[in-house]
Image (spheres, helix red, strand yellow):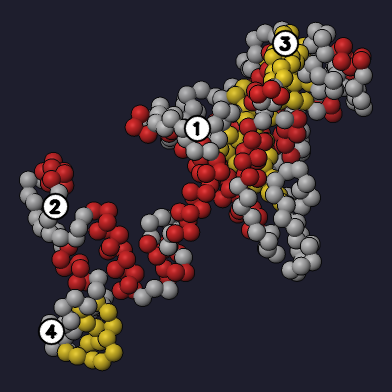
Amino acid sequence: MTGDETTWAFGGYGEAGSNVVSRVVGKPGVSKGGQTVLVSSTNRVRPYWYQHRHKYTKRYGDGWKAEGPCEVRTCIDDIEKLVEGREGEERKIFPSPPHLCWDNYFSGEQTCHHVGRKGFGLTTTCRRDRLPKGVKNEFLHKKKTDHVTTRTKIAKFIEPVILVKQDENYEIVLISFQSTSSCNIMTVNAISENRNFVEARSRGRNKHRRIYVIENNVARLIYLKCYSRIDSIDHLIKICKLGYRTWKYWHSAANHAKALAIVVAYDLYKELAEGHSDPDMKLESPVDFFTFCDSLSIQMCKYDPAEQKYPGDEKMRSVTQLHKGHKNELVYHKRIEEDGDGTNTITYQQYKKILKESKRVCKDLGEFEQHANHIYNYGSKARCVMCGEFCYKRCGICGLPMHHADTKGSN
């Protein structure tokens, strides 16, 4: 899995036309806003854990004052509850502790020890001010490289610096990144060997396509294949173009979360289109991300919350302002669409299902429910057909006045 921060932007306050509030979408260029630490599957857009960054983020005392390492520790402690054989949640989704990849903001020797004691795997770039203590700087890549020179280019071909620290049941390995900068990689329970090799890369398409090679080692290969998942998610959130000008900063965070939901939904669509989960859903040519977003937009423009098809619709104003009888009528028609035509007949499938549970088949109350859902307030009073007392309600189907209200006591 891959962990990194995802950023939502807020341009600032200002009245319309002042250009103080600008539409800033995604990184780079974010001067104000907020961040959420996100952990996702490396080969899919599958968020497994998140934590919003704020001044109340949990700290763990001595040695755990930096924000990044504390977030990794919280993440590991939460994900451990989902690993089989560990205490925590009843529903387990990991057969064994997973491997996580982070950038240098989350690095640190204390992070490696905590991850190792929990039995997890870790690959992270190591900041120059968080290198292992007790090792002289002359043996590590620490000096900052201001500009690329022939000397720094030649250094890429030299054998990487490798430090190994054995603990009780885990192993921490530090390896030089083999780039033209002073960068190192720290791993925990991630690799069993390390060697140099070259890897072919390509850029461009058709006649503009060019192939080149990069110098690599095993640890660097793992990092380069894993670290960019959250950045890819950020890119998809950016091209969602889900934003509008507002003085209220929390709208930016909400729109960021909604765009993330769209990105996850598209990845689920692609997985189903592959046909591995259900062969009937396989598609030879799935739509691209932009077409998928357009389809969602059209669907949302045509949808009325009064239909109450999705959770939360009952809280929308268009539903809460409805008359009780009209609201019940909408719910009734929704049930008719889902369960049947509202008559007293049942389908053969329903009949078979009933016989599995009981030998007795009774008529349903569909006819009564039709009348009960069509009783409305009437302007003038009339005598109830049941008790003879005055009432102010009538049935909209048969037109008869009758009491229809929850009563208490002897009534």
Mark 1 residue type:
Leu
Q: Are marks 4 and 3 in contact (CB under 8 Å)?
A: no
Mark closer to the observer (3, 1): 3
Q: Residues within 10 Å of mark 2 (few under 14, many from 20)?
A: some
Q: Amino acid at mark 4?
A: Val
Label 4, label 3: how far apart the Cα atoms are: 91 Å
Q: Is residue 91 left or right of residue 288?
A: left
Q: Earlier in the sequence, mark 1 or mark 4?
A: 1
Query: Looking at the picture, does residue 91 appear above or below residue 27?
Result: above
- Where does residue 230 sit, x and y in percent of width and height? 64, 35
Q: Earlier in the sequence, mark 3 or mark 1?
A: 1
Give the residue at mark 2: 346
**Which numbered disc flags the more N-terminal residue, 4 or 3?**
3
The numbered mark at residue 385 is 4
Please, what secondary structure does the residue beneath circle 3 have? strand
Q: Earlier in the sequence, mark 2 or mark 4?
A: 2
Image vertical order of residue 409 relative to residue 16, above or below: below
Q: Which mark is residue 360?
A: none
The amino acid type of the residue labelled 3 equals: Val
Q: What distance separates the C-alpha of mark 3 from that of mark 1? A: 38 Å
